[in-house]
Image (cartoon, rainbow, N blue to C red):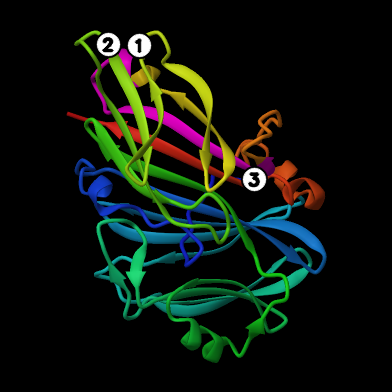
Amino acid sequence: MRAFPSCSGENGVQVADCSLSNAPKNSHILVTRVYRAKVRGCSCLITVTWSKNSMGQSLTVEIDDHSSNQSLCKVDTKPWIFSKRKGRKTLEACSTLVDVHWDFSSAKFGAGPEPSERFYVALVIDREMILLLGDLKKEAFKKTDASSAPMAAVFIAKREHIFGKKIFATKAQFCNNGQVHDLVIECDSGSGINDLCLVIRVDSKRVMQVQRLDWKFRGNQTILIDGFAVEVYWDVHDWLFGTGVAPANALFTFNLSAEKSWFTHSQQLVDPFSFPETFLDSKASSNLGFSLILHAWKHE
C-alpha cells in the first residue's frame, strides 16, 4: 500500500477547528481515512486523503487490492481554481470498472482540509454505491443513478495531523457507526516543573494519565471507550528531547478490536497502515475493529 491518503464522510471523523487553528503557517495538514470494501469478491482498501497547505486543498482517492497499487483519482479542490470541482472518472481496479464521482462546486470549507458541507464523493461499481462521502446524498444517487450496495465500505482507520502548544484536540469515532467523541491530549507540568504529565480526556472525562513523562516517554495502556477496550500507545520522545529547530511531533495510536470488550485485553492489535495485507484478509479484518493514528505537532 502506498503512502497513505485521507478521507472524509458521515462515517468519518471531523477535525476540531481549535486544533487546526493552532497550525503554524505553511503547515501541511492531512486527514486520511481508510475503508475496507468488497469489489467483485475481492477484498480491498479504499483510502481517501484530504490535504491542505498554503497552496490550497486537494483530495486523493486510492484503492489497494494488494495485487496492484493503482491510484483511482486525484482531484484538486483549490478554492481559486474552479476546474475539476465537479466531475467523474472511470478506472479499473480489482479487474472491474470503478466510477468515481465528485462535486465540490458549492462546497464549504472550514479550518481543516475537508469540506464541511455541500459536497459528495461517490464510488460506484455496477450501479451500486460502495462508498459515499459528504452530505449531498440525494444529489449523488441521482447523478450516479446508483442504488445502495448490500455490502458498503466499512470505515476502519484514520490518520490525522493535529497542532498545539500544550493541548491537542480532535473529534473521534472508534468504530464504523459509533458515537463521535471529543478527544483531548494534554501535556503539562504536574506537581513540579520537572514532573511532566500526559493526560488524555474523552468527552471531558480523564481516561488516562501518565506521570514522570520524562521517564515514560514511550508506552501503552488500555482504556475503556463505549464499553470496549482501546489500546493506547504514545511516543512523545521528540516533544521532550527534540532539537527545538523544528516543531516536535509526537505519535499517538488508539486501537480498538471488535473482539475486545472491557473484560478481554490480551489480543495484539494491528496498525493497518503498517500491515495493509492483514486488513485485506476478510476473516482477519472482520475482527480487527478500528485504528486512530494522531501525529501531534507541538510548537511555541
Q: Which residue position holds label 2?
A: 195
The residue nearer to you, when weighing 280 against 54, is: 280
* Amino acid at dot 3: Met
* Amino acid at dot 2: Asp
Mark 1 or 3, closer to the camera:
1
Q: Secondary structure at mark 1?
A: loop
Disc on the earlier residue, 2 or 1: 2
- The magenta stretch is 239-260
Mark 3 or 2, closer to the camera:
2
- In the image, what residue occupies the spot 81% across and 49% down? 283
As drawn, 182 above or below 244: below
Q: Residues within 10 Å of mark 2 (few under 14, many from 20)?
A: some
Q: Is 210 contained in the magenta span?
A: no
Q: Residues within 10 Å of mark 3 (few under 14, many from 20)?
A: many
The mark found on residue 1 in the picture is: 3
Q: Which residue position holds label 1?
A: 212
- Using the rendered view, name the quadrant where residue 177 is placed: bottom right
* Residue 5 coordinates in the image, percent (x, y): 50, 51
* Residue 275 coordinates in the image, percent (x, y): 67, 38
As drawn, 293 above or below 281: above
**Marks 1,3: beta carbons within 8 A:** no
Which quadrant would the N terminus be assigned to in this image? top right
Residues under labels 2 and 1: Cα distance?
Answer: 5 Å
Residues under labels 1 and 3: Cα distance?
Answer: 38 Å
Residues under labels 3 and 2: Cα distance?
Answer: 41 Å
In the displayed structure image, the side of residue 239 where residue 101 appears, left or right? right
* Residue 229 coordinates in the image, percent (x, y): 59, 38
**Marks 2,1: beta carbons within 8 A:** yes
